[in-house]
Amino acid sequence: MAGNYLDMFSLEGKTALITGANTGLGQGICLAYAQAGANVIGVARRSCQETAEKIAAVSGSFTEILADLSDLSVISRIVAEANAVCGRVDILVNNAGLIKRCDAVDVTVEEWDSVIDVNQRMVFFLCQAFAKGWIQDKKGGRIINIASMLSFQGGIRVPSYTASKSAVMGLTKALANEWSQHNINVNAIAPGYMATNNTANLRSDEQRGDEILSRIPAGRWGTPEDIAGAAIFLASEASSYVNGFTLAVDGGWLAR
Ligand code: NAP
């Protein structure tokens, strides 16, 4: 362990790879990790220019890898490019995800698959790809999956999203059971209702927006900055005996 307790939260000398790095919570986690001292690699299907600029402003290190995460065939390239940049990734954050709102009776197979492919299949196979290397080199690693309130609850008109995020929480436990012995900590963060593109439709629906806001004990929507502390904690030595847990950062939503 490091000399003083605050040092346990440092990510100095570590490399973190975050998916969905161009915006929202992914961008917030990139910035938090850069400020905690990590080299940051952002994966996104479009330019992470804004994220790069924010990290440059705090003199952090950032590299972008472009990839569409609906297609599992990109994984080997992501691992190879990331290793070429930094030698080794120490922290994987599976943040990229999408939501489709639709009455359950109207969901099409295409819609269902588009959500499951990114939110669930890609998450599992990215975990697998990095864990394989970490088990081989015996140096361990950290995985932080971004779950949801809908890992705990059913939600309304988002069945594919609920299925995928419930799977993320289940997988987080399943993988921790296999990989904790290899010094790989697999945990998840379940954000509450955060003001990002993901919730733009909800927030523009005045009635649903007001209903949600009135149910949040903290009395406000969350922001990308709100999950920075939990994301740093789960990536750092401070959480080395935390395994398979999904930490809600939700302004008290689940406590209601
Ligand atoms: P967001 O702004 O919509 O960000 C989602 C990210 O995922 C974007 O970078 C998006 O890229 C990326 N993505 C989606 N499909 C992709 C694909 N096929 N290939 C590559 N990247 C893809 O929303 P957010 O709130 O920051 O979401 C981040 C994570 O938090 C998601 O897993 C979401 O489910 C979860 N979450 C959010 C909330 C909330 O209230 N906001 C609550 C619970 C959980 P593009 O910008 O190119 O679309």
Image (tube, rainbow, N blue to C red):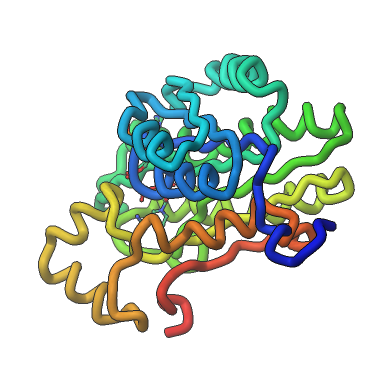
Q: Viewer-proximal residue, 253 or 24? A: 24
Asked if residue 221 shows in the view, the reply is: yes
Image point 41% across, 49% down: which residue?
Answer: 28
**Location of residue 97 in the rendering, given as x and y in whole percent from the top left corner:** 42, 42
Of the pair 57 and 90, the residue shown nearer to us: 57
Quadrant of the image containing the N terminus: bottom right
Location of residue 232 with respect to 82 vertically, above or below: below
Report whether 210 appears left or right of 157: left
Q: How many marks?
A: 0
Residue 26 screen position, x and y as percent: 43, 44
What percent of the width, then of the height, locates residue 152?
A: 51, 67
Is residue 103 shown left or right of residue 142? left
Residue at 49% over, 25% down: 63
Question: Which quarter of the picture shows residue 240?
Answer: bottom right
Q: Quadrant of the C terminus?
A: bottom left
Q: Is residue 150 something that shows in the picture? A: no
Residue sitting at x 57%, y 38%: 123
Taking the image as shown, residue 237 lies to the left or right of residue 247, namely right
Please provide percent x and percent y for residue 201: 19, 53
Displayed quadrant of residue 2: bottom right
Residue toward you, 13 or 226:
13
Q: Residue at x 40, y 58 (%)?
A: 225
**Quadrant observed for ligand 1 in the rendered image:** top left
